[in-house]
Image (cartoon, rainbow, N blue to C red):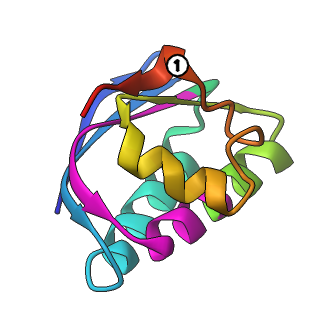
Amino acid sequence: MKLSCVECRRGRIHVKIEGKLDMTTVPEARKRLLRLIRTQDPTSVEIDFSLVESMDTSAVAMMVEVLRVLSQNELNLDITGMRDEHQRLFTLARLNQAFGLNHDNRESS
């Protein structure tokens, strides 16, 4: 799993995640995402999933925590590049609406 900050300035965080998001990689990804949010004091956060090969429910749990932290600070989360198979995990957990997942931010698989 690779997590890179495409843009981390002017109050904007744009993060690109690459590889697998599973129970072995999520703890580090979670730590890095939350650290970025705390240290950069963003006004907006975008997370790009277009290069995520696979993910499991631990990735969904990580995103719930990120959304909770952002919501507490009245910040919005923009998820882009979500593939159909990844979005299904959010839909099965009935979280797709909470994350605003629809055809506009999905990428065909």
Kind of residue at disc 1: His
Whole-percent x and y of residue 22? 32, 75
Query: From this viewpoint, which residue is outermost toward the bottom?
Result: 24
The residue drawn where x is 68% and y is 63% is 93
Find residue 16 and report its image quarter: top left
Going 64% across and 51% down the picture, which residue do you hit?
91
In which quarter of the view is residue 28 placed? Answer: bottom left
Residue 66 in which image quadrant: bottom right
Residue sitting at x 64%, y 24%: 43
Q: Is residue 103 left or right of residue 95?
A: left
Q: Position of residue 89 (x, y in %)?
A: 52, 59
In which quadrant of the rendered image does the N terminus lie?
Answer: bottom left
Relative to residue 55, is residue 30 drawn left or right?
right
Indicate the quadrant containing the C terminus: top left, top right, bottom left or bottom right. top left
Compare residues 85 and 67 and report the one nearer the observer: 85
Residue 70 in the image: above or below residue 25: above
**What's the magenta region?**
45-64
Q: Secondary structure at mark 1?
A: helix
